[in-house]
Amino acid sequence: MKRTIKSLTILIVSTLISNYESMAQTSKEGCIVKVYSEWAVPVGSCIGSNNTYKAYFVNQCGKSVDIKLAIQEKSNRWRVFNHLNIAPGDTVSGYACDGTGKFVTWSRPTGNKSIVFPTDDEINRDYK
């Protein structure tokens, strides 16, 4: 009985930690969710890098959104991607040639310019 309770407690705590980490790395609205990532995949200008990190995100909102996505390099610089008019259920991706596995996303309803994304410079200054 004690073993079952201990196992259940570990499972619950692990799930809560995993959900917290996931929420911390998704947009404020929770619409953009990481669904998959992979390492050492040749991407774009990263051919030959063994530390390439590529992540895929899905729009789980019920409306189209614009997305700004930043993937961190080991130099602490962010590689930034803008994806516009992403339909519900569609997937987008971003990568870092020498990645850390960290990412940040922002989203807004498509075309809503009253919600301003941070600039690339602001991202590199404010996110470490």
Image (spheres, grey):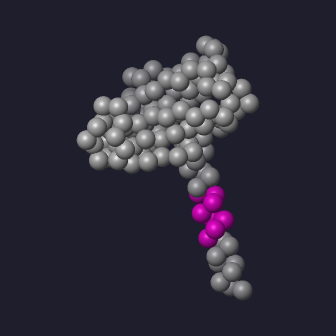
How far across and how far down the image is residue 13, in percent? 62, 64
Q: Report if residue 16 lies within the magenta region.
A: yes
Residue 5 inside the magenta-drawn segment:
no
Q: Quadrant of residue 95?
A: top left
Q: How many marks?
A: 0
Q: Quadrant of the C terminus?
A: top left
When the figure is inspected, residue 80 is found, relative to residue 50, above or below; the finding is above
Image coordinates for residue 23, horizontal then vertical, percent = 60, 45
Q: Nearer the viewer, residue 82 or 23?
A: 82
Magenta stretch: dominant secondary structure: helix
The quarter of the picture where residue 122 lies is top left
119, above or below 72, in the image: above
User: Residue at image x 36%, y 36%?
Assistant: 43
Left or right of residue 2, residue 104 in this image: left
Which image quadrant: the N terminus?
bottom right
The spot of residue 35 in percent (x, y) is 57, 45
Residue at far left of view: 48
| Residue nearest the observer in this picture, 16 or 36 | 36
Q: Is residue 33 visible?
A: yes
Name the foreground residue: 95 vs 69: 95
Residue at image location 27% in from the left, 43% down from the top: 49
Toward the right, the furthest residue is 62
Residue 73 appears in the rendering: no
- Residue at the extreme bottom of the image, as rendered: 1
Residue in the picture at 45% in, 20% down: 119
Q: Which residue is nearer to you in this view: 75 or 61?
A: 61
Above or below for 71 versus 37: above
Magenta stretch: give its range.
10-17
